[in-house]
Every structure is written in C-alpha cells, then in structure tokens.
Image (spheres, rainbow, N blue to C red):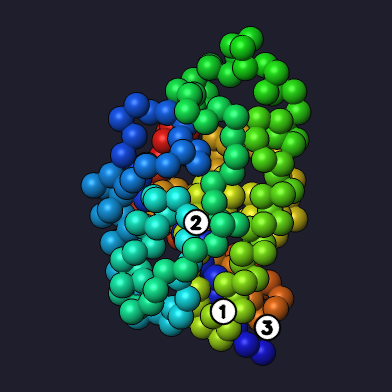
Amino acid sequence: MTKTIVHFLRHGEVHNPEKILYGRLPGYRLSDRGQEQAKLVADFLAGRDVRHVVASPLQRAQETAAPIGAGFGLDVDTDDRLIESANRFEGLRVSVGDGALRSPQHWPKLRNPFEPSWGEPYVEIAHRMLGAAQRARAAAEGSEAVCVSHQLPIWTLRRFVEGKRMWHDPRNRQCSLASLTSLVFRDEQLVRVAYVEPAGETDPRVTGA
C-alpha cells in the first residue's frame, strides 16, 4: 500500500491593526511575526519528502507557502477550494466572545447556526476541502503535500473526516496559526489525522489571526 501525507497548514499571523474580520478581503499580508512563523514551518518540514505545495489564492496563504516551496524547489500551485469561508461579518470588528454578536443588528445573520446562516454552509466547506485534499494526495502520491489554507476550512475538514458534527464552538478549535493538520492516506483511504504546532499555540479567539 502507498502512504501519502497531505498537510493542511494554516497561514501565519496577519498584519491587521484594525482588528477586523477580513475573511476574503484582498490585501491582507503576513505580519513580521507571520513571516517568521512561515519560516519556522518551512524549517520543520525540511528533510521531509514534500513533492507538492498548493495554497489558497489569498495573499496571506500564498506568502505562508512561499518559503516552503522555495525550500523544496517547488512552484506553489493555487487551488480556489482552499480559500477562506465566506462570511457576512467580513469587514466588521467582531470576534469570538466579545459580545458583538448580541447586537440586534446582527440577529438576522444568526438564524441558523448549523448552516451557518452568516456564511458558507459547513457541508460545502467540508466537501470542497476534501476535494482539495484528494487532488493534493494524487499529485504527491507516495510522498507528501502541503496545502495552505485557513482556520475554519481546516477545522471543518478535520471534524468532517473524524465523523464529528461540524457545528461547534469556535473558541475550542485546535488550529493555531502556522499549525499542521495532517491527513495520512494508505492508497486512497484516510487512516489517521495528526496535528502539530511548529510555531507554537495561538488563541483561536483572536480576530484577524
């Protein structure tokens, strides 16, 4: 049986002095710390058998992927399925646990937590991310691939493949900045999920992280 590992890497810290929920907005680059986090991951993966690197089209993901691609002499591909989830709070100063979502102006967006009504349905996120995983697995068959994405899509994919409900408390996500959530395949069958934090643990509640 052929073993293939597909690493899902969350991007590094973003320069976001306004502390807004930027979502898919363009122009959000890595902070200096985020650049260091990307290098730490590249160093962590050095010596592994990485044959394929692919990233979300958003700037912060592309910048996180760059030192990994350079380290292995690989071009960074782009897969739109790795993009951040759509979110109707995009551009606003809201974060988990800050009370902003108790404001009546936001209630119409919160009518269905299972969809979620404020953004892209969880099942759609899971399916597109799984499609990206299978594409990367095929591209790196017998070796390893790195897919750079975002916290909610990675966490949704993990809960989906582990057979857990996708509705969850965002404060409990295990998906720190520059962390690796790794899917281990034997041929086309997923056999294990692993998680490591090469750049250390970060708070999932921080807006704009």
Task: Name the kind of residue labelled 1 in the image.
Answer: Ala
Q: Choose top left, top right, bottom left or bottom right for residue 88.
A: top right
Task: Using a 10 Å C-alpha cutoff, classify the residue at mark 2 as few (fewer than 14 neighbours), some (14 to 19) or many (20 or more).
Answer: many
The CA span between labels 3 and 2 is 25 Å
Whether pointer 2 and pointer 1 mark residues with C-beta atoms closer than 8 Å, the reply is no
The amino acid type, in three-letter code, at marker 3 is: Asp
Residue at 54% across, 62% down: 79
Q: Secondary structure at mark 2?
A: loop
Q: CA distance from mark 2 to mark 1?
A: 16 Å
SS state under label 1: helix
Secondary structure of the residue carrying tag 3 is loop
Residue 104, percent across and down? 63, 10
Image location (x, y in percent) of residue 30 = 32, 47
Which residue: 55% across, 75% down?
A: 5
In the rendered image, the vertical position of residue 106 relative to residue 11, given as above or below: above
Image quarter in which the C terminus is found:
top left
Numbered mark located on residue 72 in the image: none
**Can you tell which of label 3 and label 1 is closer to the viewer?**
1
Residue indicated by mark 3: 187
Give the labeled residue for mark 2: 56
Q: Nearer the viewer, residue 63 or 142?
A: 63
Name the N-terminal-most of marks 3 and 2: 2
Residue at 70%, 60% (x, y): give it: 161
- Image x and y of residue 140, in percent: 54, 80
Q: Earlier in the sequence, mark 2 or mark 1?
A: 2
Name the residue type under label 2.
Ser
Of all residues, the one furthest to the bottom in this rendering is 1
Q: In the depicted view, which residue is nearer to us: 79 or 133?
A: 79
Q: Which residue is mark 1?
A: 139
Q: Reply above or below: 144 against 81.
A: below
Of mark 3 and mark 1, the one earlier in the sequence is 1
Residue 168 position by quadrant: top right
